[in-house]
Image (spheres, grey):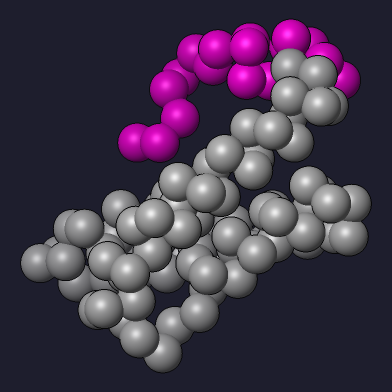
Amino acid sequence: MILPKIRDKRFITIRRGGALTDDNHRLLALWAAECAEHVLSCYEDVCADDRRPRLAIEAARNWVRGELNMTRAREAAFAANSAAREVKASSEAARLAALSA
C-alpha cells in the first residue's frame, strides 16, 4: 500500500482541504522526481524497453515548470504504477523503483 487510509493533511493541497501550498507542492514533486531518478536503474535493468517510469519522472518535472497540467502528470504516474504491477515477483527492487516514479 502506498497511501495510508488516513492521509496526512500536510501532503494535501490547500484546495483539497489540506495544508500544502502550491509552492511546496511543486517542491515536493521535484524532490520525489529526484529520489525516483536515483533508483530508476533498478527498474530499467529489468525492463529496459519500458519507459513509463522515466516518462513519469519527466512529467513531474514538466508539471513543476508549468509545461504540463496535473491531469497529464497524473496519467504518467498511473502508467508508472501499471509498469510496477507488471514486474515479476522476483524483481521487488524494480517494482518499487517504478512505484517511486
Please tell me whether the stretch drawn in magenta is mainly helix, strand or loop.
loop
Residue at 81% from the left image edge and 27% from the top image edge: 23
Which quarter shows the N terminus? top left
In the picture as drawn, the residue positioned furthest to the bottom comes out as 49
Question: Is 2 placed left or right of 96 in the picture?
Answer: right
Question: Is 60 placed left or right of 42 in the picture?
Answer: right
Question: Is 97 placed left or right of 26 in the picture?
Answer: left
54 is within the stretch colored magenta: no
Question: Is 38 placed left or right of 90 in the picture?
Answer: right
Q: How many marks?
A: 0
Residue 85 x %, y %: 35, 63
| Residue 96 seen from this side | yes
Magenta range: 1-19
Residue 73 x %, y %: 73, 56
Which image quarter: residue 78?
bottom right
| Residue 85 seen from this side | no
In the picture as drawn, the residue positioned furthest to the left comes out as 90
Which image quarter: residue 29?
top right
Residue 91 x %, y %: 16, 66
Residue at 87% from the left image edge and 20% from the top image edge: 15
Residue at 19% from the left image edge and 72% from the top image edge: 88
4 is within the stretch colored magenta: yes
Residue at 83% from the left image edge and 27% from the top image edge: 22
